[in-house]
Image (cartoon, helix red, strand yellow):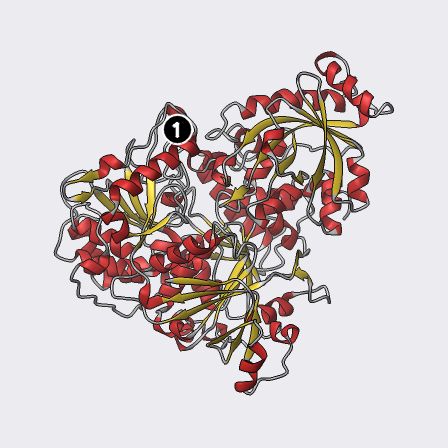
Amino acid sequence: MVELINNGAYLAFGNTIIEDDAYAAERLKALGKEGISKEEAKKGTIAYGIFNAHNTSGDENELRIKFDAMASHDITYVGIIQTARASGLEKFPIPYVLTNCHNSLCAVGGTINEDDHVFGLSAAQKYGGIYVPAHIAVIHSYMREMMSGCGRMILGSDSHTRYGALGTMAIGEGGPELVKQLLCRTYDIKRPEVIAVHMTGKPKVGVGPQDVALAIIGAVFKNGFVKNKVLEFVGDGIANLPIEFRNGIDVMTTETTCLSSIWITDDETKRYFELHKRADAYRKLSPAPVAYYDGVVKVDLSSVEPMIALPFHPSNTYTVRELIDNSADILRQVELDVAEQLDNPNIKLSLTDKITKDGIKVDQGVIAGCAGGTFDNLVAAADILSGHSTGCGAFNLSAYPASQPAYIELVRNGSAAKLMEAGVTLRTAFCGPCFGAGDVPANGGLSIRHSTRNFPNREGSKPGNGQIAAVALMDARSIAATARNGGILTPATEIEVEYTTPDYKFDSAVYDHRVYKGFGKADTAAELKIGPNIADWPVMPALTDDLLLRVASVITDPVTTTDELIPSGETSSYRSNPLKLSEFALSRKDPEYVGRAKEVQKFERAREAGEDTSKGELAAVFAKIREIAPAANAGNIGIGSVIYANKPGDGSAREQAASCQKVLGGWANIAAEYATKRYRSNLINWGMLPFIYDCADDFSVGDHIYVPGIRGAVETAKYEFGAYIIKADGSVKPITLKMGELTDDEREIILCGCLINYYKAGN
């Protein structure tokens, strides 16, 4: 299905791959393209042209990007606007869309969710924003329908900000990166490598976009093949994909850990923009006659089978048929892997008990969000279920059209009725099933979902309370086929269906009647409406001369997701209150972390108050410090907590994975590597040092790490730092902490203590 070309390759005339080997020049010559250099050909990618058009640095390798538009939802926009407001925000300089698709149920915490929505509308009125009320559209559906455009760049505070199939390079980042754009600053990165995703063939009937996406994710995630790179979709197979099929693949590229994505555009793309009454947003995008890519992912669409991603990651992929044929072996191995990952003898996820004489029995199905809730997916599900039943037993299926315009058309063409008659419950536009705030299965349940992620506990269970459930990712078509078969796992390619594929007719009336379109209409005299749960960020200290870090958690899992660093679901109601939210940090992974971090924080608060922290509880530690550095001054040694994790930060873009640690007095992370660029950026923007050190065995909870001269080292752009691990028994081990390259602004942000301090200092 998927093949990787690890070395670079040329793409000739949009479809011919020529590997960069000893014969490349000869093959190019045979095509009449001899003499072209690799560096020149690199400029032939679509990504190169879009980056150049948005780069303000004058240096094509050191990019300083200004975006065309931005988007946030209701668990991120309050913190972003509060941060920007504290840093001097006057009005939104570019279109900024505030959607309400995460906390839209307003079911937890009293009034506080709706208070956030009221704040969002008042902010749109005051600063000139675009406000999409709850239940109208999920963030990425609205951005596709109303804000995308060929050659544009969009920044979003949600990791699945991906509109590449519509010719738009979109990037999901933590909130501070959006704050920079609001303050007319730039998004600063080195020019990323570009990987071609070369598509050929045509999908089989019954294969959907999630199947193709999971096949790609399974091939590239674990080996890091596309990490922090741009995926550029090319090849003649794209012409065989409807636009929503492309969108469904594209949004899942986030799970490969790539930076962004872009696709060639064609008449199908043009038709999409014409349909949405934005014909001027279209222009043809294609690589130059010869373009060079840093690697290739070859996808034969005709060989893709219905796929399933088993717990607990979208990369844990199998074909559905492979799973059915080898269910006992595969599910038992998943159980063992889950037990190792959860590392809790009191919690056991059993999947082998789902095996019955009829097949693998599933408890629940969900089709939802930016990946699953598209018009095409739901029409296909309706066709599969037309005249059939989801059954009167335990299995249930719910579907969430991702925008009201799509929902309206499903009603008008009869697809909604087909789904409802079959027993499917139709909901409004809501992202909850993607992060554990809706359709939480029963304890021990197995839910199959066309959504974006199946991380541990992302379905909403609470292992701390003895609850555990599991999500497996599948395409809407195979979910509907499973529902039609009474909840017995079934690939859609193995049932007879007459697919109707009706044309989609976009009706913008609901947007015209409900969306507040205030860009360019800022009313600076308007007041923000701030509810009782909306709190300002606490004061955060600047980086001190030296640091004393106490290890508050050691996580040895191969990958640590942002959901494990700060859980989704039940925490969403507190995203506007930094202090309350921080109480949930690592609660599902290390419930003792918050208490340990607070214990360390009391020493830093004492230091800031002028007390001598070298006495009392830390006397023995400071005695060792003075052996290392006799002139060390306790007043200039900042004291904070640190976590070690092998590879933290996979998953969501939300900044709170880092900011909660900072609020609790965290001053650094130490990692073998960082899973994503966006998590590392979140650490930096909250004034935390993203150290690199590849030996978890050297650290234990309660160890102290003394880092002398850290402020001076950061000021002088050093990237290696001598440090000392001070063990409880008094032994000392010298180590070298490393840190990847920082921009001048990033160094200054760390020195100031966080982005807010950086702007308050007049930067």
Towards the viewer: 605 or 299: 299
Towards the viewer: 658 or 24: 24
Q: Residue at x 24, y 46 (%)?
A: 397
**Residue 494 quadrant:** bottom left
Kind of residue indicated by mark 1: Pro
Tell me if residue 512 can be seen: no
**Residue 34 quadrant:** bottom right
> Residue 623 location, x and y as percent?
78, 17
Q: Is residue 101 above or below residue 631?
A: below
Towards the viewer: 395 or 91: 395
Q: State the quadrant of the N terminus.
A: bottom left
Tell me if residue 312 can be seen: yes
Which residue has dot 1 on it? 463
Q: Residue furthest top?
A: 616
Left or right placement of residue 390 versus residue 259 in this view: left
Left or right placement of residue 406 versus residue 256 in this view: left
> Residue 734 location, x and y as percent?
73, 30
> Residue 275 location, x and y as percent?
38, 72
> Residue 424 location, x and y as percent?
21, 49
Q: Residue at x 63, y 33 (%)?
A: 662
Q: Is residue 645 above or below residue 25?
A: above
Q: Is residue 125 above or below residue 380?
A: above
Q: Residue furthest front?
A: 22
> Is disc 1 surrounded by few (<14), some (14 to 19) or many (20+) residues within 10 Å?
many
Left or right placement of residue 583 versus residue 217 in this view: right
